[in-house]
Amino acid sequence: MSKQLIETEEQFDQLMNQDGTFVFFKHSLTCPISKAAFKEFEAFACAHGDVPTYFLEIQNTRELSAYVAEKTGVKHESPQALVFSGGKIKWHVSHSSITKEALEYNM
């Protein structure tokens, strides 16, 4: 399964209603830290094709990013990775703490 771009609140709500576990990444298109973290997210997604992975691009969906923070109770940061299980936050991390290994460990 490849990573999928999420652009609307409706798409995010559908994810939240899933029973399974998935990874959600908030990505800044202009930040070098976010670029490095996105490479780690991509490495995780490639190595774990059975785990659904989704992302948003902050510059194109600021309202959605704020909505995710509101719905989850996790303060917005960028870059940020969130692991969901059964529609609830299981774990989250930001900035240079986002690594393939950290995502694997916290699944």
Image (cartoon, grey):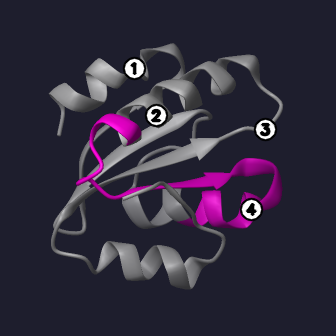
The reply to whether dot 1 and dot 3 touch (C-beta < 8 Å) is: no
Residue 103 percent across, percent down from the top left: 29, 31
Give the magenta range: 46-67
For residue 52, what is the image quadrant?
bottom left
On the image, numbered disc 2 is attached to which residue?
41
Q: Is residue 64 above or below residue 23?
A: below
Question: Residue drawn at (70%, 51%), measured in percent from left and top?
Answer: 57
Task: Assess disc 4: are there few (<14), some (14-19) or many (≥20) residues with their C-alpha within 10 Å of its C-alpha.
Answer: some
Looking at the picture, which amino acid does disc 3 mark?
Leu
The C terminus appears in which quarter of the rendering?
top left
The reply to whether dot 2 and dot 1 touch (C-beta < 8 Å) is: no
For residue 106, what is the image quadrant?
top left
* Left or right position of 32 against 74: right
Task: Assess disc 1: are there few (<14), some (14-19) or many (≥20) residues with their C-alpha within 10 Å of its C-alpha.
Answer: many
Looking at the picture, which amino acid does disc 4 mark?
Thr
- Mark drawn on residue 99: 1
Mark earlier in primary sequence (4, 2): 2
Residue 30 percent across, percent down from the top left: 83, 31
Mark earlier in primary sequence (2, 1): 2
On the image, numbered disc 3 is attached to which residue?
29
Q: Is residue 62 magenta?
A: yes
Mark earlier in primary sequence (3, 2): 3
The reply to whether dot 3 and dot 2 touch (C-beta < 8 Å) is: no
Mark earlier in primary sequence (4, 1): 4
Cα distance, mark 3 to mark 4? 11 Å
